[in-house]
Structure formats: structure tokens, C-alpha cells
Amino acid sequence: MHIGVIGTGYVGLVTGACFAEFGVYVTCVDKDQSKIESLKKGIVPFFEPGLESLVNKNLKNGRLRFSTDIADAVKDSLVIFIAVGTPPRGDGSADLSYVEEVARQIAKNMNGYKVIVTKSTVPVGTGERLKKIISEALNENHRFDIVSNPEFLREGSAIEDFMRPNRVVIGAESPEAIAIMRDLYRPLYLIETPFVITNIETAELIKYASNSFLAVKISFINEIANLCEKVGADVHVVAKAMGLDQRIGPKFLHPGPGYGGSCFPKDTLALIRLAEEHGEDLNIVKAAVKVNQLQRERMVRKIVSSLGDLKDKVIAILGLSFKPNTNDTRESPSIHIINELKKSGAVIRAYDPAAMNDMKVLFPDIIYAEDPYDACSGADALVIITEWNEFRNLELERIKSLMKDRYFFDLRNIYEPSKVKDLGFIYQSVGRKV
Ligand code: UGA
């Protein structure tokens, strides 16, 4: 089978490379010429473990190719995935102009029956809308079907999530399109992946409901963590015992500075907006969004209330990406925290294994360090914001000797409080007794 993937961002490139790995011939298209030129040379413009080697392997065996011409992908392909961005508008709703433009381009280049699949996260009703747009833009009368096949890839473990998903969701009306999609995903049948076959609207909503529920889980445990600090309880033990109840489950109960990334913040707002358009109030999702904002502010207060006046205080920040194993800084809690500390006059010395170039665009005027130790040099306080593996086993004696003062804020709870305190640090984490 030959497929096309329009959009070589995070979702499109992972989808294209993984389907090529499954033995499918894939043409990935992007309008960004320089991006396509580097992808043709096997250079992936962002950091995702395993992706560059998968791209190179499938470039070499000829199953993956890159182009700037949508016609190239449409003419040869039975299935075309739309994986372009759906950025938030000012009111939180998703901007569908890129998706709609791609749909028009697909329509103009059709030369037979096509299955047109939305992979981008799109609001409920988009499938119907695309049907209309494509029908109107067709040059000749060709048959086509629309499918919603939302992705559930986590940045940092996207390849694993694609190859071994918890489920595959296919929203479609026609048995022909469903059969083609099943065929495409056949390697996952062999490992007994559950398939949810449903209508387009349900598939579209599953994506928003899943991301919003995970955001609710995180905000919930963050509030419990805050309460733990007041009553002397340990949030990890609370979360562990809660998670042992199979009705609750152990995942996404890790407290911290709040969720970030391109998905949860955007999708929760888009779901709230969608509900409002239909006269419904999603109070629980709204609360999760509010709690997330409050959690970031709370992290800043933790630091300010210990250090007092921040004027000219040197603060080492470890971790700028919104989570480990990615260079993505979108909606990263570090942005809010750095902003507030800077406003109060603090000098920031930051380090991140992958995200420093991205952060330089937002904060050109903070100090970017060589490594964690360089960041801590002369610092009054150390703040860990992202739980990169290389921060889990720092030489704390060395850090202590490099720092001017001993404040240590571990916002991801990666250290054992008593060990750090015994070394002489003034240690604080989230939801654990100090
Ligand atoms: C999320 C979903 O997990 C994916 O299933 C989905 O496909 C993706 O959005 C998307 O819509 O494209 P992602 O944003 O890559 O994936 O990252 P997550 O691992 O879900 O983490 C999101 C944020 O929540 C991070 O800032 C992370 O630090 C935070 N988090 C996560 C916590 O604070 N606590 C937790 O227990 C888990």
C-alpha cells in the first residue's frame, strides 16, 4: 500500500516513519522547503528518541520519501493523512485553516478513490466539514471517505506509543474505509491491540476527552499534593495507594509544577470552547485548567517565600522543556516560573539537555549554562523543573560546594528529601513533608 502524510511536524513525521517501518510506502509532504531538504538528508528538525534512525533506515530502503508537492502524495496514495497544525485561536478554539487548505489541495489532485484521514486533533464536526469542503473543491467526480484516526503519542516516547498503542481509534462511516484502515494497521492486530471502530464524531471526541481526563488527573493530584504539605502527608504514598485501586490506575498521578506541552493546555481549552458552543459547561475541565495555572504560581511563591527579596539573587534552573526527552518548550511551566523570577530581579542560570536553543528565542537575556554544575555556580538556589534522567543523580556535594546558598527546590520530586537535607541543603519538593 502507498500512503501520503501531509505535515511533517511531530505527529506527521512519527506517523510516516512508523508506517514505513510497518512495510508501507509513505510520501511525507510539507510546504516548508528547507525542512523537506533536510529530511531528505535524514536530518530530523526536533528531538525525539529513535526517530532520526527510523527516518534514515526507511529513507535508505526506499519506503519513505519527502516532497513539497501535495500532488505527489495524493496521486500515488490510497490513504492520505492530514497531520498539519491546529493552533489555538485567541478564544481557545482550534484554528482549522491549515487543515481545510490541505483538504482543498487533496481534492484538487485526486485521481481516484481516496481515504482521507484526520490525524491532527480536530474539533467534533470537522470530519463533516471536510466532506463538504472536499466535495466542493473536487475537479472531477471521485469517490472519497473521511476517517478520524486520532493519535495518542506522547512526546519523548512517540515511537513506542505508535508501535505498541493501548488502542487504535478509527471513526468512519464506510465499511470500505474501515477495511482499508484495518489493513494499514495490520501489524498491530498481531500484537492484539484493541481497535475501537466508531463514527467520526465519537472518534474526534475520544481524543479531547482522553487528553482532558489526563489533565484532570494531574490537576487533582497537584491539589492533593498541596494539601499533603499542610497536613504532613506524603503525596507519593497517597498516589501509590490510590493507583493500586484498578478503578483509578497508577498513571498520571505524579505531582509537579503543572502540565505543559502543546496538547493538554490547548485541548482542554478547545474542549471547553466546543462544549460552550453547544450550550454545555465542562466544570471539571475548567477546574483542571485553573488549578494548573495556580500550581505554576504556587511554585513561584514557594521560591519567593524562602528566598525573600529576589533582587540580584542567582537562581539555577534545571530543565526548560515541558517534559524530559524533548526540546519542546511550548507551555512549559519553566516559562512562567522564569518570567516571574526575572520580574522580581533574579539572575537566571539555566540548563537543559535539549531545549536551550528553543528557550533562547523567548529568553535571550538569561544565562545558558554548559551543564548542571555550571548552572549552579554561584547560585543562591537550585530549582529542578523538568525530570531529565541526567538530573536524577547529580553530585550533590559538588553542587553544594559550587553554590553560594543552599536552597534546593525539587519541583518534580526526584530526590529523597532526607538525603538532600542531610547534605545540608534547605530542601523543598511538592506534596512531601520537608
Ligand atoms: C499528551 C498525551 O499523553 C498523549 O496521549 C497525546 O497523544 C498527546 O498529548 C497529544 O495530544 O498529542 P504529551 O503532551 O507529549 O502527550 O505529554 P505527556 O506525557 O502526556 O505530559 C504532559 C504534561 O503533563 C507534561 O508537562 C508532564 O510533565 C505533565 N505530567 C504528566 C505531570 O505533571 N504528571 C503526570 O503524572 C504526568
Image (cartoon, rainbow, N blue to C red):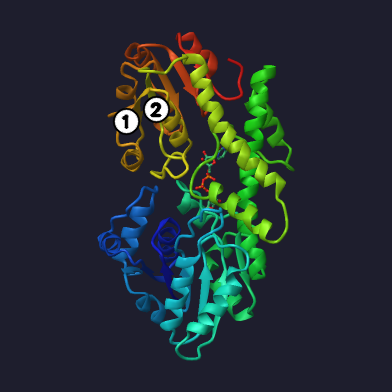
Q: Residues within 10 Å of mark 2 (few under 14, many from 20)?
A: some
Considering only vertical position in the picture, is 193 above or below 282?
A: below
Q: Nearer the viewer, residue 336 or 382?
A: 336
Q: Residues within 10 Å of mark 1 (few under 14, many from 20)?
A: some
Disc 2 and disc 1 in contact, CB within 8 angstroms? yes
> Which corner quadrant of the image does residue 17 belong to?
bottom left
Considering only vertical position in the picture, is 79 above or below 275?
A: below
The disc at residue 366 is 1
Q: Amino acid type of disc 1?
A: Ile
Foreground disc of the pair 2, 1: 2
Q: Is residue 159 left or right of residue 290?
A: left
Residue at x 25%, y 63% (from the top left corner) = 37
The disc at residue 342 is 2
Considering only vertical position in the picture, is 220 above or below 183?
A: above
Q: Is residue 99 left or right of residue 400?
A: right
Q: Is residue 297 visible?
A: yes
Q: Nearer the viewer, residue 240 or 228?
A: 228
Which image quadrant: the C terminus? top right
> Which corner quadrant of the image does residue 101 belong to?
bottom left
The disc at residue 116 is none
Q: Is residue 256 visible?
A: no
